[in-house]
Image (cartoon, coloured by chain):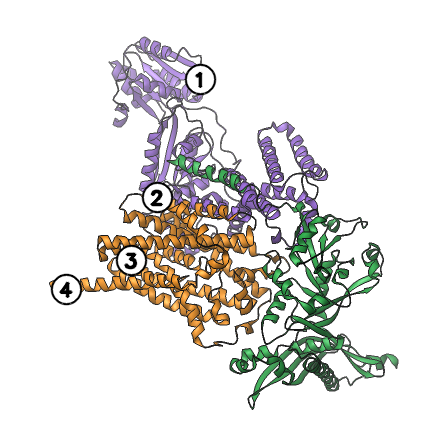
Chain colours: A green, B orange, C purple
Amino acid sequence: MKHKHILLIFGFISCLFILTGCWGKKELDELALVSAIAIDESELGYLVSVQVMVPREIASDFSDELTTVKLFSDEGESLFQTIRKLTRDLPRKSYFTHLMAIIISENIAKDNMVEILDFFLRDPEVRPDVPIFIAKDTLAQDILNVLTHIEPIPASKIKKVGLNFQTNYYGVRDTTFLNLVTSIASAGVNPAIMGLTVYGNKNEGEKNVNIQEIEAKAAIKITDFAIFKNEKLIGWLNEDESRGYSYLIGEIKNTIITIPCDKNKTQNLEITSFKNKTKLKMENGKPIINITHQINSNIAQLGCSIDKNNYQKLEKLLEKEIIKDSQHTLNVIQKKFKSDVVGFGELIHRKKPVVWKKLNQNWDDYFVNLTVNLSAEIKINRPGVVDGDVIKKILK
Amino acid sequence: MEKVKISNYQLYTLMVLFGLGSSSVLGLGKEAMQDAWISIIIGCCFGVIIFLLYGMIIKNYPDYSIIEILNKTFGSKLGKIIGFIYIIYFAFYTSVVLRDIFELLSLYVMTETPIFVLALVSIIVFAYATFLGIETIVRFGVLIFVISIPLKLLFILGTIASGITALENLLPVLENGLRPVIGASFPLITGIPFGQMFIFLMVLPYVKEKEKTVKTSIYAIITTGIILLLITIENIITLGPLFIDLSVFPTIQTIRLVNIMNFFQRLEGLAVVVFLTCGFMKGIVYLYSVTTGLNILFKTKNYKFYLIVALPVILMCSLLYTQNLSTHLDLRSSIYLQLINVALEILLPLIIIFIIYIKQLKKNKLK
Amino acid sequence: MKNLRNLIKPKTKNTKEEIGKSLKNNLNNIKSILNNNSDLIIREFKISDNYSCALIIIDGLTSGDYIYDYLLKTLMIDIRTTNLLNNISTVNELFNNILDYMITLIDIKVSIYFEDILDYLLAGNSILIIDGVAKCFVIETKGFTDRGVVEATSQTVVRGPKDSFNETLRTNTMLIRRRIKDKNLCVTERKIGTITKTNIAILYIKGIAKKTIVDEVHKRLDKINIDGVLDSSYIEQLIQDHRYSVFPTIHNTERPDSAAGALLSGYVAIIVDGSPYVLIVPCLFLTLLQTSEDYYHRFHFGTFIRIIRFIAMFLTLLTPAIYIAITTFHQEMLPTPLLINISSQREGVPFPAFVEALLMEITFEILREAGVRMPRAIGSAVSIVGALVLGESAVQAGIVSAVMVIVVSITAISSLIAPTYNLGITVRLYRFFFILLAASLGMFGITIGLMILGLKLTSMKSFGVPYLYPLSPTNKEGLKDSIVRFPLWTIKKRPNLISDYNETRQEKSSKKKKKNRR
C-alpha cells in the first residue's frame, strides 16, 4: 500500500522532467536585458532602437574602455516586428522586464501613439510603471546614444532624472505609461508628459570620452512638457508654462520659486509643501472651479532686504508670482491648446456626475470657456539657519 | 462517505479559501466600474440569504450530502438523474477553476510552458489531495489559510505603502444609478464566488457540531466578502476603473505596481503563487465533491476509484471547453451559465425545501 | 522475602531444560553450551567440607568488588564466624539460609532453567550453584565499564543541564528517575533481539500519558522479530508509522532533561540498552524544531530562536531552488541592480544554473560527510580544500559564480541549525527534490512541491497523533508552545491529543512561580 505513494511521487517527478524539459527556461546569459527603448518614425514605418545593458561592464570596478550599454536599431512596419527583426543583430533574446524608459519621438506622438501603447499594454514583460518620455527637437534614438556617468546605465539616469526633477523641482501627473493610458482613456483629462532632449555635441555622446572627462560633451536633460489632446501630441509648454502647469495640478513636492524684486535681483523661496484645494461650485447651472494653492515655504536666498519681523510683503509677492504663472499657463492651455490637461473635466465627473453627463460630449469646446478662479494661501515658516537681514549686515 | 469529522474552524477556513479561490485575482464586478465594491457588498448579502436557504435543507438532513438528499426527496430514479446532473455541473466547475489557474500561470509566471503541462501538474495536486481524504484537505486548508490570507493582506498594504493609491478614483459613487451595480453583482450571487458555496452541501455532513454549521458558513461568507471588498477597493484606488476594465487579472496588475524602498518590487510572481494556493483549494474541494458524489450515487465503497474516471475528463474539459482566454473570461457573465446557476443553486434547493415542507405536512396530518 | 523464594516463572511454556542436582553435571552442561569460552570463569569452592559450590561469571561483565567482598569473602570466610552452618542439616536449608542471611547484595533471583541462567550470565550476573540443589542463585553483579555521564555531544546547550544519556540502560533510567520522583513514573522492560537480547525500557507517567499510545507502543514492540538491536534507531525504524516517509516520525534525544520534559507532557520514552539516544513517541513535526533550551531562556529569546530555526529550515529547503527558479525562469522578479550583479557573475560560467547548483550542493554534501568520517588528525586538510579550493578558486576560475557559493553557504549554515539531526537530514534530502522541481517548473514547481509536501505532512500521523498537531488540527493550548513559546506561567494545559487524562499543568496559584517545565 505504502509503495504506491513512493511510486506516485517518483512517477510524478519523472513525468515533470519528461514533459517540461527546458520549456520556458532562459539562462541569464541568454538574455539581452533591454534598459530603454526609443521609437522613431521612418520610411518603412518605425525605427526602433533598444538599449541593451552589458552587465559585466556595469558591475565591473575598472575598465572604462567598453561601454556599459549597446544600442541596436532597425526599421520595420510594426513595432513588434521590428523588435524581433533586431535578432538579425542581437545574439540574445531581448528581454523587456527591466525596461526603465520608453522614449517616443515627437512625430510618432503626433500621429499614432495608440498602436505603440497597445503593444506595451499587452506585453506581459513590460511593466505598467515604466516612465515614458517624448523626445523634443531630436530623434528618440539620439537620446539613447548618450553615455552617462554617476548612473552607469543611461536609461537609469533618464528614469532617475525624471524622478529627481519631479520631487525637487516640478512635475507632471502622467509619468508612467499606465498614467498615460488612463489619461487618454478618460474623457475629462488629457495627458501631459515630460520631454527629453540632448544638449551638446550629439556625436560625442556615444563615445566613452563623454564620461571620462569632467564636463560631458553631450547630456540628456529634461525639457518642456508635451501637451496632448486625446492621444495626439499638440504642442509644448515652455519652461515657465510647465512650471505653471505643475502649480495647477499641484504636482510639486519641493521646489524653489524665484521672484524678481529689484533690477537683476531675486528673492528665492524654497517651497516645502504645496497643496491644491480645489472646489467646484455651480452658478447658473455652470460649473466654476476655484483652486487655492496652499503653500508652506522657507527663505532660501534673498537678493533684496526685507523687514525681519514682517514676512507678509514677501508672502504677497510670492502669491502674486505663483498666481501669475498658473494664470498664464491656464490661458495657454485654454486658448492656445484647447486641451484640458489639468483634468477639470475629471473633477466635474467625480464631484458632479449629473452635470458631467451633459458636458461629457463636447467637453473640449466647453473647457475653453470654463471659469477657473485662482488664489493662494502662503506661509513662510523659517528664514534658514541665519536670521535677520543678512545682506544689510554684511554690507555695513 | 468517509467516517471523519471536521471542526467548525476548519469548515470556516475552507469556505473562506474556497470563496477567495480564483475570484480574488479576477476583477469582480468590472461592469460596475468604480462601484464594483458596492456590487460585492450586494453580492455578499445575497450570498448570506441563499446560504440561509441551504440551512433550511441541512436542518432536515444534517447527516446527508446533497446527492443523498436528492434521492430522499425526489425518489431514487429522478434523484439519481438530478444528482448526476449536479456532478457534471461540479466537474465542469472543476475544469473552470483549473483553467483559471493555468491561464493565470501562463500569463504571468510560466509564459513559455505548454498549458497542458501546467494543467496536468495542477490536477495531479488536486488528485493527490482528494486521494488523501477530506480530513487532510481541511487540515491542509487551515495551513494555507494561515499562510496565504495574511500574505494577501500584506500585498494589499504594499500598494498603500508605495504611495500609488488615489482615493478619488472611487468617485463618483453610483454614477449611473443602482442598475449597473446590481447587474454586475448578479454573476457574483449566482456564480463566483458566493453562489458556488453551494458545493459545501457536499462537505457539511462531515461537520462535528451540526447546530453551528450555518452560523459558521455565514461568518465565512462575510469574511470572504470583506476580503474581496478590500481587494476590489485596492484595485480601484490603485489602477482606476478604466485600467481594471482593460486588465485580465487586475489584482496582479495592482501588485505589479508595488514598490517599497526600491526593493520590495516586482512581487507579482510571488503574488500569483500565493493567490494560486486558494485556487488550488477550490479545485480540490470541487474534485473531492465530484468523486464522493459519484461514490454515493453508485453506492460503492471507495470514492478514490472515481479519480481515474474524473481526472482525464476534467483535464480534457478544461483544455477544450473554450478556445482562448477571452472566451473563458466572458463565460462568467454569459447568460446561459447564469441561468444554469440559478436553476441548480437556487431553484432546485427551493423545490427541495418545498417537498420537505409537504412531506412534513403529510406526516402531521397522519398523526 | 517470600517472593524471592518463588522461582522465576518461565516466560513460555516450552519445556526447558532444568538444572540438575549434580554440580559437576551442571558445570559441564554450562561449559558445553558456552563452547568452553575463554572469558567464562568458574570458581569452585566449598562452604564447609560438605557443601561444594561454584560461582560462574563472564569475565569483564561483572564487578570484581562485588564478587570478592560480598560473595566469595562472605561465603568462604565470614560464614565460618557465624553459627549458621551448625544449625543446618540439609543442603536445601543451607540454600535458604544463604539467601536469607549471607548474601549482602540486593538483586538476587532464583532460577532453575539453564536457558534463563545463561541469559542472566551473559548479561553480567553471577551464578551461584550449590551441589545437591536443583536451583541456583542469579546475583546481580553487573559492573562493566561505560562512558560515564558526560556532556551531550550532538544536542548541546548553552544554558541548562549538561549531562547526557550514555550506553547503559540503568544509568539512563536513573537519569530520568532523578528528575521525576513520582510514583506514577512507570518503567517496563523487555528484551528484543533473538541474539543480542537487548534490554529495552518503556517509560511513561501513568495518568498523564495516553493509554492508547502506550498500548500502541507495546503492540508495535511485540511485533518486532529481529536478530539484533544495536542502537535505538533499529527500534525507531521498526516501529515508525510511515516507513517510506523521509520525515522522522519518532523523536530522539540524548538529553535527560528533554526526555523528562517529554514524559511530563505525556509522551512515551523508549530507552534501548547500548544507545545513548532515547526515543520519544509520538513525534510531532514542531517538536523536531524545538530544544529544551528554549524553555531555559526567558520566553522572548525562546520565541525568537524558534522563529529563526523555522526560517532557517525554509532557507535550507528552498534557497537553491529559489535561486534556480529566479535566475532561469523569473528574471523579472529581481530588482534591476541585483539582476545586473548576478547576471555579470553568471557571464562566462559554463554550466546552466541548475547544473551549477547541483554540482555545488553535492560537493558540499561530500565535504560535510568527509568532515564527519575523516580521522581527526587530517581535519585541517579538508577545511583548506573546502574553503579555499571550492570557495575561492572555483569562482576565480569562472567555473561557478560567486552568488552560487553564497547560496550554498547559506543553505549549509542554515541546515546546521536544525536541533535534531534527523530533521536536518530530511530537509537536506528534500532540498534536491525542490531543486529538480525548480529547474523544471520554476516558481510554480516550488509551489507544487510545497503543496505536495504540505499535504503529505498533514496526512501523516505518529502513533495516532496528527504530525502537524497543534498547527493543524489546531489546538489553542498547544499553539502556545509551538513556533512561538509563551511564558511558562501561561502554558497551563498539556496538548490534548497527547495527554487526555490530565491536561492541567499548573493551577492558577502557580502563576508567579514560573516552574521549570522541560
Return the mark for residue B364.
4
For label 2, the residue is B304
* Distance between the alpha carbons at the discs numbered 4 and 1: 91 Å
Q: Position of residue A185 (x, y in %)?
A: 59, 70
- Figure quadrant of residue C188: top left
Kind of residue sitting beneath label 1: Asp
Instruction: Tell me if residue C412 can be seen.
Output: yes
For label 3, the residue is B210
- Figure quadrant of residue C508: bottom left
Q: Residues within 10 Å of mark 3 (few under 14, many from 20)?
A: some
| Label 3 element class | helix
Query: Subunit of mark 2?
Result: B
In the image, what residue occupies the spot 55% across and 88% down?
A: A285
Q: Position of residue C292 (x, y in %)?
A: 48, 44
Q: Are marks 2 and 4 in contact (CB under 8 Å)?
A: no
* Distance between the alpha carbons at the discs numbered 2 and 4: 42 Å
| Residue B203 left/right relative to A164 | left
Pair 2/4: label in front: 2
Kind of residue sitting beneath label 2: Lys
Q: Is residue B241 above or below residue A37?
A: below
